Image (cartoon, helix red, strand yellow):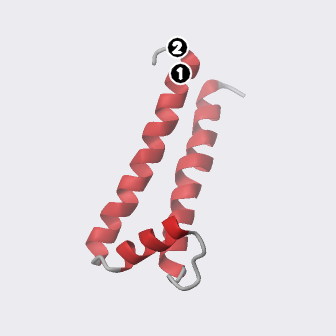
């Protein structure tokens, strides 16, 4: 596997698929159904927001993933 393919697969699996899963969970889980205290607090906040504010939360969560993957790659290649 070449480096471009590897990066594309990591982006797909870690960033794109997990971001979609977060969105789906936040949109489909009720606070009552959540069992994790952190997730309950996040759901309570998320559900209290407008559609535009929810989109911002999802964008921030995605960017955190992108930044984390970037930092990991930097550690692996020695640039960080």
Say if 18 sits above or below 39 in the image.
above
- From where the camera sits, is residue 24 visible? no
Is the residue under label 1 in contact with that under label 2 (CB below 8 Å)? Answer: yes
Residue located farthest toward the right when viewing the structure as drawn: 1
Q: Position of residue 72 (x, y in %)?
A: 54, 29
Residue located farthest toward the front when viewing the structure as drawn: 37
Q: Nearer the viewer, residue 76 or 13?
A: 76
Say if 76 sits above or below 47 in the image.
above
Name which residue lies at 55% across and 43% down: 11
Say few, some or many: other residues with alpha carbon within 10 Å of mark 2 (under 14 / 14 to 19 / 20 or more).
few
Judged from the image, the secondary structure of the residue bearing numbered disc 2 is loop
Name which residue lies at 52% across and 14% down: 78
Give the left or right position of residue 12, taking residue 23 as reference.
right
Name which residue lies at 53% across and 21% down: 75
Q: Quadrant of residue 18?
A: bottom right
Give the left or right position of residue 19, taking residue 10 as reference.
left
Judged from the image, the secondary structure of the residue bearing numbered disc 1 is helix
Say few, some or many: other residues with alpha carbon within 10 Å of mark 1 (under 14 / 14 to 19 / 20 or more).
few
Say if 36 sits above or below 64 in the image.
below
Q: Position of residue 60 (x, y in %)?
A: 36, 54
Q: Position of residue 35 (x, y in %)?
A: 60, 75
Q: Which residue is mark 1?
A: 75
Name which residue lies at 55% across and 72% down: 25
Q: CA distance from mark 2 to mark 1?
A: 5 Å
Give the left or right position of residue 21, taking residue 66 as reference.
right
Say if 56 sits above or below 76 in the image.
below
Q: Which residue is mark 2?
A: 78
């Amino acid at each position: 596997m070449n480096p471009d393919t590897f990066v594309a697969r990591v982006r797909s699996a870690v960033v794109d698929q997990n971001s979609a899963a977060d969105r789906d969970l936040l949109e489909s889980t009720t606070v009552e159904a959540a069992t994790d205290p952190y997730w309950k607090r996040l759901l309570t906040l998320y559900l209290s927001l407008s559609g535009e504010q929810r989109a911002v939360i999802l964008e921030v969560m995605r960017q955190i993933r992108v930044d984390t993957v970037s930092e990991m790659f930097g550690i692996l290649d020695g640039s960080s």
